[in-house]
Image (cartoon, coloured by chain):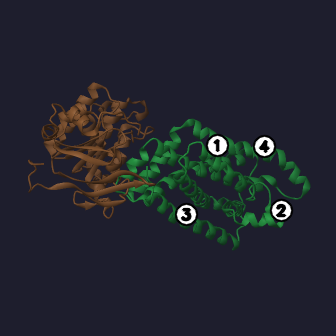
Amino acid sequence: MSDLKNNSLRVIEVNHLVKRFNGLTAVDDISFSVHQGDIFAFLGPNGAGKSTSMKILTTVLNPTSGEVYVNGHNVVKEEHRVRESIGVVFQEHTIDEYLTAYENLYYHCALYKVPRKERKERIDDMLNTIGLWDRKHHLVKTFSGGMKRRIEIVRGLLHYPQILILDEPTSGLDAQTRFFLWNHIDKINENYQVTIFLTSHNMEEIEKVSRHTAIIDHGKILAMGTNDEIKAKTGTASLERAFLEVTGYSLRNA
Amino acid sequence: MEVIFTMWQRQIKLFFRSKPRIIGSVAQPTLFLLALGLGFGPVFEQAGDMDYVQYLTPGIVGMALLFGSMMHGMSVIWDKKFGFLKETLVAPASRTYLLIGRCLGGATSTIFQGIIVFTLSSLFLGYRLGHPGVIPLLPVIMVIIALVFTLLGSVIAAKVDDFEAFPTIMNFLILPMFFLSGAIFPVSNLPSFVQVVTRFNPLSYGVNLLRETMNLELGAANLFDLGVLLTLIVILLFIGRRVFQNIET
């Protein structure tokens, strides 16, 4: 992490995080930090502990041990402060199919206490940027997976969070949606200095998008740094090769 | 507070957007009302001086509230399965308020079913309220009864993750509660050990309170019914708070 400015604010700080489920260790003593304005990716095979870490960062799960601070707040003791600071896009859809696009976004505003007067304008703006303004009064169940994902991304931004956390945001999406999505995330990061934390197992996307990456497997961080640093350390030409070098070439059954 | 209102509104919207759900939820108690009212009415009347429709109607309203409210817990499992629960769990909103909003929404949509049953019975079976003045009391009592069972249903649903198991568990609880509540026949003639069971049945107090209000037979004993129901709501809220605080998806 040589290029990490020491004076920059660390918006995510994780110290010796451990999470066990009935004897199974999903996250095994990991520590890392993400500085403000960064795009930080957790890269790992299925079952590596990415989603579990992400659920702890978003206060859905409590850690077994270790300390996690998001935007300076402890995820266990100050969960509401953490929740106010983050926007979350989960791996699976978390949108209400029997509500319209507008209602889904409006209810989000209500749950996050967005000032009433600003709600309509924010929602209309967001729906415009994702090209779904004319469908705003349609039930979400009539939408495709890509359309739902677009709504989930803007929903996560409606309350102007400092950090956007995305778990496998592009899995199962078509190329157009993926392209749009990464551009949009880049823009948010660029224009509003929103810190992005994401998990993925898509190497090419991570190589293009993230500035810092942690390769995680079996609940441990195996390599961490800028993508160039990781490649240099492993003596490989692509992040994909570096990833295989670090995590091994054998198939997984977990 | 807006959180409660938001969840309330959402649950009501979900209910009224599903036509099959509305029809099904109204059809079942209606069927019971007609079958029992027309079938057993003459028998009861021959046996004594009891006006069975006057007895039965509040019981079937109670039944509609019981079935609708308990099954409303299904929406918790639904939201867990289809993800919306997670969206509410990462929001900076009190989970107790989320639970209260959900249950109030469920209770409101079930009292709609109760009111339909009451109206149908008045129109077609000749049911008469004891006094029109009790009408404003009815929705209040119905919400209290429905809250007990929406809370119970939601707490069980939060613990049971299984789509298939939930209705089975619910039927196992609902049917004995319904039969042993005095909804369709007086429990005072039952063997004494069964009568003891009915005293542990929350619906007994609900049906009793509802019947004696609707037929204007109110007495001091009804305060006890009300007290039991309100106490149950407080206890279930306390349990529900803990369950929803620790819910992990």
Mark closest to the chain's N terminus, 1 or 2: 1
Relative placement, left or right, of B119 versus A38 is: right
Mark closest to the chain's N terminus, 2 or 4: 4
Quadrant for residue A76, please give it: bottom left
Measure the C-alpha gap from mark 4 to mark 3.
34 Å
**Letter of the brown chain:** A
Relative placement, left or right, of B245 versus A38 is: right
- For the C terminus of chain A, the image quarter is top left
From the image, state the color of chain B.
green
Residue B140 image offset from top left, x and y in percent: 58, 60
Relative placement, left or right, of A251 versus A221 is: right
Name which residue lies at 9% across and 48% down: A2
Chain that bears disc 2? B
Mark closest to the chain's N terminus, 4 or 3: 4
Q: Nearer the viewer, residue A227 or B186?
A: A227
Residue labelled with disc 1: B26
Question: Quick check: B225 above or below A225?
Answer: below
Residue B246 image offset from top left, x and y in percent: 44, 58
Chain that bears disc 1? B
Residue labelled with disc 3: B236
Quadrant for residue A177, please give it: top left
Residue labelled with disc 4: B35
* Amino acid type at image mark 2: Leu
Mark closest to the chain's N terminus, 2 or 3: 2
Measure the C-alpha gap from mark 1 to mark 4.
14 Å
Measure the C-alpha gap from mark 3 to mark 1.
27 Å
Which mark's residue is nearer the viewer, 4 or 3? 3
Tell me if label 1 and label 4 are in contact, CB under 8 Å. no
* Amino acid type at image mark 1: Val
Residue labelled with disc 2: B190
* Amino acid type at image mark 3: Leu
Residue B125 image offset from top left, x and y in percent: 76, 46
